[in-house]
Amino acid sequence: YSTSTGNTETIAGYIAEASGLDANDIGDATDSEITGSDALIVGAPTWHTGSDEQRSGTSWDDWLYDTLPKLDLDGKKVAVFGCGDQESYSDYYCDAAGELYDKFVEKGCKLYGFTSTDGYSHQDSKAERDGKFIGLMCDEDNQYDMSEDRAKAWIAQLKEEGFF
């Protein structure tokens, strides 16, 4: 994960607690940690609304375009989570998560953990594919009281899907 205001770090903490894994900032990750992992759970906030690329305003922006292209991740299991504000930025809700999804798919990764858009009040999101979110989406500004339970349910879903 990477974070701007701490919201994505909070969600990464919920995911880490539910899964028993450690949460690490992508800016601190080594190439061998990424390529040597059996599976990756990746997450980002959306900061640069309306942008076609580098939407997170975090370490992901450089990593996705400078580091990821050099790594062999073909067949790697990946699950994506995102943070956004569906009330103030309803036309761009969790767009950076969609960018993560696109870039990992381009590298040949297998993506897990699609979730329903029910219970959200956004207008549009680049993190939607065929009427579903491409992973876990959280809104720490407007639905902070739902994030921990959403993270727990998502980890249970990933286990059922054979991610772990």
Image (tube, rainbow, N blue to C red):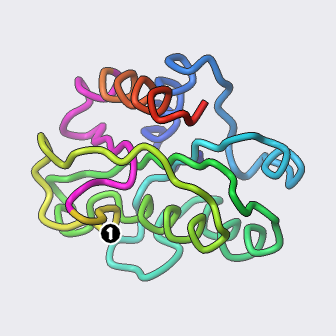
Query: In the current view of this chain or complex, which residue is farthest to the bottom?
Result: 52
Question: Quarter holding the C terminus?
Answer: top right
Label 1 sits on a secondary structure element that is loop
Query: In the current view of this chain or complex, which residue is farthest to the right?
Result: 32
Query: Can see residue 2?
Result: no
Location of residue 158 in the rendering, given as x and y in whole percent from the top left corner: 47, 33
Residue 123 located left or right of residue 144:
left
Name the residue rendered at 32%, 41% in the picture.
138
| 95 is higher (above) or lower (below) than 78 | below
Q: Residue flagged by tag 1: what amino acid is it? A: Lys
Query: Can see residue 108?
Result: yes
| 61 is higher (above) or lower (below) than 5 | below
Q: Closest to the observer: 115 or 124?
A: 115
Question: Quarter holding the N terminus?
Answer: top right
As for residue 161 lying within the magenta part, the answer is: no
Q: Quadrant of residue 133?
A: bottom left
Name the residue rendered at 23%, 23% in the picture.
145
Mark 1 is surrounded, within 10 Å at the Cα level, by few (under 14), some (14 to 19) or many (20 or more) other residues, namely: many
Location of residue 53 in the rendering, given as x and y in whole percent from the top left corner: 49, 79
Residue 2 located left or right of residue 66:
left
As for residue 142 lying within the magenta part, the answer is: yes
Q: Which residues are magenta?
A: 131-148
| 152 is higher (above) or lower (below) than 39 | above
Name the residue rendered at 25%, 55% in the picture.
132
Location of residue 55 in the rendering, given as x and y in whole percent from the top left corner: 46, 70
Residue 96 located left or right of residue 91:
right
Residue 70 located left or right of residue 113:
right
Q: Which residue is mark 1?
A: 126
